[in-house]
Image (spheres, rainbow, N blue to C red):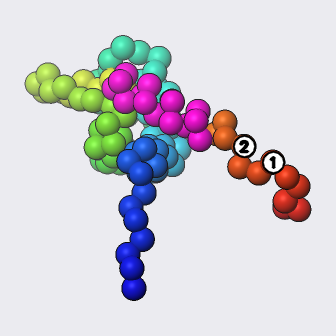
Amino acid sequence: MAQKSKYCEETEILARYAKALAHPARVSIMQFLAKRNTCYFGDIHEELPIAKATVSQHLKELKETGLIQGEIETPKVKYCINKKNWKNAQALFSDFFNKDFCDRECGC
């Protein structure tokens, strides 16, 4: 059986961004960081109603996706939004949500 072709790179990237933003804690982290140029881990933890270890896991997910970046300033890590990747995410989501998927009555 023939293998299906892979998704285009933009589709893969959009799906990664969507997955990273698919948790309320990560959306809250992004909203928190958007209000600042940078912030420290302790600041983020104080804003969210979850354990430090859980905040750390969410930060790791956002960082791996490239939506945020971190910089070690012993003994803390400073986090901020990765502006280049955030602009890319905005463009991809905008293109996706501005498409007309169905111009006719679908009966849905």
Q: Say which of 87 and 59 sits in front.
A: 87
In the image, residue 65 sits, relative to residue 71, either above or below, namely below
For the residues bearing labels 1 and 2, Cβ distance under 8 angstroms:
yes
Q: Say which of 97 and 25 sits in front.
A: 97
Q: Can the viewer see residue 21 in this picture?
A: yes
Residue closest to the far left: 74
Q: Say which of 52 and 5 sits in front.
A: 5
Tell me which residue sits at (42%, 57%) in the image.
Answer: 7
Q: Which residue matches tag 2? A: 100
Q: Is residue 99 left or right of residue 38?
A: right
* Residue 78 x %, y %: 24, 24
* Residue 47 x %, y %: 45, 30
Disc 2 marks which amino acid?
Answer: Asp
Which quadrant holds the C terminus?
bottom right
Q: Helix, strand or loop at disc 1?
A: loop
Indicate yes or no whether the magenta region holds residue 84: yes
Disc 1 marks which amino acid?
Answer: Asp
Residue 6 occupies quadrant:
bottom left
Q: Helix, strand or loop at disc 2?
A: loop
* Residue 71 x %, y %: 19, 25
Query: Magenta residues?
Result: 82-96
* Residue 23 x %, y %: 50, 48
Indicate yes or no whether the magenta region holds residue 89: yes
Q: Which residue matches tag 1? A: 103
Which quadrant holds the N terminus?
bottom left
Tell me which residue sits at (85%, 52%) in the image.
Answer: 104
Q: Is residue 34 left or right of residue 102?
A: left
Tell me which residue sits at (66%, 36%) in the image.
Answer: 98
Residue closest to the far top: 37
